[in-house]
Image (cartoon, rainbow, N blue to C red):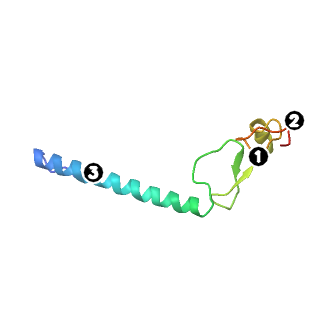
Amino acid sequence: MHEGKADAIQVGVRGLVGALYLQDLAHKVRRGMTGVIRDGRHAGGRAYGYRPIAGKPGEMEIVPEEAAVIRPNGCPWFWQPCGGNGRG
């Protein structure tokens, strides 16, 4: 709504209300994402090597072709080196 000419007080109040709204919105989004993660579901966007499972929101399945790129030796853990046979 536009009420004509805005004075300095109106500009300040609207800026404050906007800032409070954004803080509240950020808090609600973080709270929602925390609940999704707590339930063991995926809370992010598209992850290479995974695809969403139809009919199960937030659940992902491994795409074998893409997983082969991520784990070229067949090593299941990215944070530790695999043994000589490539199977850990």
Task: Give me the residue at 80% from left, 44% from top.
Answer: 64
Q: Look at mark 1 in the image and give the residue it sits on.
A: 63
Nearest the viewer among 71 and 1 is 71
The mark nearer the N terminus, 1 or 2, is: 1
Q: What whole-number distance in Å separates the C-alpha atoms at marks 3 and 2?
A: 58 Å
Callouts 3 and 2 close, C-beta under 8 Å: no
Residue 5 visible at all: no
Callouts 1 and 2 close, C-beta under 8 Å: no
Q: Position of residue 23 (x, y in %)?
A: 34, 53
Q: Position of residue 87 (x, y in %)?
A: 86, 42
For residue 55, side relative to residue 75 (left or right): left
For marks 1 and 2, give the one nearer the viewer: 2
Q: Look at mark 3 in the image and give the residue it sits on.
A: 18
Q: Look at mark 2 in the image and give the residue it sits on.
A: 84
Q: Amino acid at mark 1?
A: Val
Nearest the viewer among 86 and 36 is 86
Q: Amino acid at mark 3?
A: Gly
Numbered tag placed on residue 53 in the rendering: none
Q: What whole-number distance in Å separates the C-alpha atoms at marks 1 and 2?
A: 25 Å
Task: Give me the residue at 17% from left, 47% from top.
Answer: 12
